Image (tube, rainbow, N blue to C red):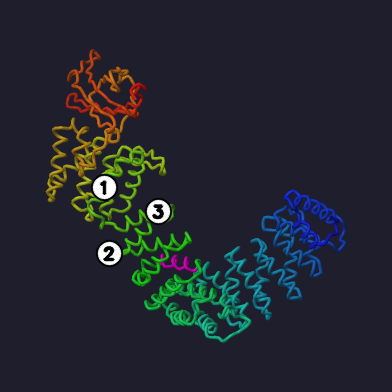
Amino acid sequence: MSPSVRLQEMIRVIRGARTQGEERGVIQRECAAIRAQFRQADNGTRSHNLAKLLYVHMLGYPAHFGQMECVRLIASPRYNEKRVGYLGAMMLLDEKQDASLLITNSIKNDLSHSSQYVQSLALCTLGCMGSAEMCRDLAPEIDRLLRASNSYIKKKAALCAVHIVRKVPELGELFTPASRSLLSEKNHGVLHGAVVLITELCERNPDTLEQFRKAVPELVQIMKGLVMSGYSPEHNVAGISDPFLQVRILRLLRILGRNNDTASDAVNDLLAQVATNTDSSKTAGSAVLYETVLTVMDIKSESGLRVLAVNILGRFLLNNDRNIRYISMTSLQKIVQTDHNAVQRHRGTIVDCLKDQDASVKRRALELSLALVSAVNIRSLMKELLLFLSSCPPELRAHTTSGIFNAAGGDVRDETVPNLIQLITTATELHCYTVHKLYRALITDISVQSLVQVACWCIGEYGDLLLRGECEETEPVQVAEDDVLDALEMVLQSHMSSPATRGFALTATMKLSTRITHNVDRIRSIVSIYGSCIDVELQQRAVEYNALFKKYDHMSPALSTTALGPVSSTAGGDLLDLLGGLDAPLDHVTRPEKTLGPSYRLFMTFVSHFHPPQSVQLQMKAPSGDVIPAHGLGQVTQTVLLNNPNKVSLKMRVRVCYTSQDFVCQDTVQIDSFPSPAW
């Protein structure tokens, strides 16, 4: 390829490359030729070469060596070269490049040029890549152009001023007077730029916002003129008169009317007029109506107008365009709490969207359907949600299930609690995850009684797992003993707790006495308070638990696995899941003595209670004695016969409890390193 090849020819050759390597070779050769020509004296090809370099830049290849050529071409007196130079500056330069400072003076000179097209080039470049320093230096020039008589220049200057305000917010006060006067313009381009600039000024300065609230009547008149005007080919888009300007005005009115009664009252009639006179069959009309709805919901609008806005969103749900259906449900989700009855009228259409093929629409429909569940429609809506659950995508199944459970709340049947507890009991590997999740749910909200009951049961049963804070499925959270007891005491004292829920909480508190070490006295205090409770069932539990503390404290470790459960049929489980323990050496267990068949004989130095898996048959012989001689002069052994035909892995937790001079001592060890012949 020769160095003088035209831009069109270079593009054709690059597009014709069959491999990426071939494309790179073409571009490298062309860039080398461009570099060589840049080093030569001005031969009239600089703009041509820079144009080719800009195409190379758009393909993602390095083009930084053309930055200085941009500076040179911007300073050129020729319009064609100046145009390419400014285009290159917008693409190759930014405020981090030192070369950007070199064009500040050229831009300032061009802003005063006699040609509006040269002025336009300077305005576009400053509005695209002007740094904070450039904006400060050139802001007075932009303010001067905002007051010019040329509508073409005022439009460009307004958009450039928006960039300056975003870069240097304190310069907004400079443009406030000129931007206010632009609202009297008839040119739609100038009006559009003025509304965008005023919106930017109001969002950044509360004082400016208050000033422009006086312009609300003027904005209303402009908007009414757009809505009621006849056909204008220059501004018509699908039957809507300049929908771009309408959308911008509605956004500005939303900002001006927010939290202001006067401005809101001035806008209400206009919004009703727009809502009833805009055709929603085309995308342009839907865009205007959507902005109208957002404005209605954001200002202090009348109740009838809010119902009208919800009905517009309801019509959007029937639109064939999935994007429109999606934004409709997103908007309804935001207002369902404040306008629940109005949204409820469209429940059937929302439920139908659960059958949509688009996953995003389906998810939004699910979230909105769950938000619409009430005591009146729970039966009919739950049928639809359960039907959706049977066929919903796997990624929505968990969200749907939890949403149905949360929506049902206290209306779940009584057997749901023990059934869920039974399910948790059998899922051994999820005990840690479950107790962490339910604890967090408990401290967040205790209004759903059935969920609180399950949470209390899990905390009482697996409290040691919660205190360790070693759950792999959730973020590590350090939970202190006092935190757990505070949560249970909150349930006991809450007016929302039913007697049954308090029973779960009291039992969980009692169970924790075998799982914590530093707050046993606090547990005794909590339990003793309810010994005189007016509720007979709760009083009986408290009295029995107090008796365990006073007379049978040495038996509490064993009793905690059975007698303390409010649902004894499900509160069992094996000892391995109920008692936290310390690692113990294998010295506590001798090697198994093999007997006939698949049975083994174990000699242990501690008395223990076992709850083996169903496949393991266990028989405990009587201990060899009930006294262990001091100073290691003897031992007490107990023989346990195990029949383990399925060769399941064996683990055992042993708790030792003894009294010395009225001081109760206890310890727990776990043995999980049985010799392989035992399993």
**The disc labelled 2 sits on which kind of residue?**
Ala
Q: Residue 142's x, y, as percent?
A: 66, 71
Q: Secondary structure at mark 2?
A: loop
Q: CA distance from mark 2 to mark 1?
A: 24 Å
Q: Residue 191's x, y, as percent?
A: 59, 78
Q: Secondary structure at mark 1?
A: helix
Of residues 592 and 632, the one nearer the viewer is 592
The number of callouts visible is 3
User: Which residue is under mark 2?
Assistant: 375
Tell whether label 1 touches label 3 (CB within 8 Å): no
Task: Answer left or right for 8 relative to 549.
Answer: right
User: Which residue is under mark 1?
Assistant: 419
Q: CA distance from mark 3 to mark 2?
A: 24 Å
User: Which residue is under mark 3?
Assistant: 397
Q: Residue furthest front?
A: 597
Residue 521 at least partly seen: yes
Q: Quadrant of residue 194?
A: bottom right
Q: Residues within 10 Å of mark 1 (few under 14, many from 20)?
A: few
Of residues 241 and 141, the one nearer the viewer is 241
Q: Quadrant of residue 132?
A: bottom right
Q: Residue furthest top?
A: 633
For the C terminus, which image quadrant? Answer: top left
Q: CA distance from mark 3 to mark 1?
A: 20 Å
Of residues 346 and 233, the one nearer the viewer is 346
* Residue at image coords 15%, 43%: 541
Among numbered discs 3 and 1, the one appearing first in the sequence: 3
Is 656 included in the stretch rendered in magenta? no
For marks 3 and 2, give the one nearer the viewer.
3
**The disc labelled 3 sits on which kind of residue?**
Arg
Q: Residues within 10 Å of mark 3 (few under 14, many from 20)?
A: some
Q: Quadrant of residue 409?
A: bottom left
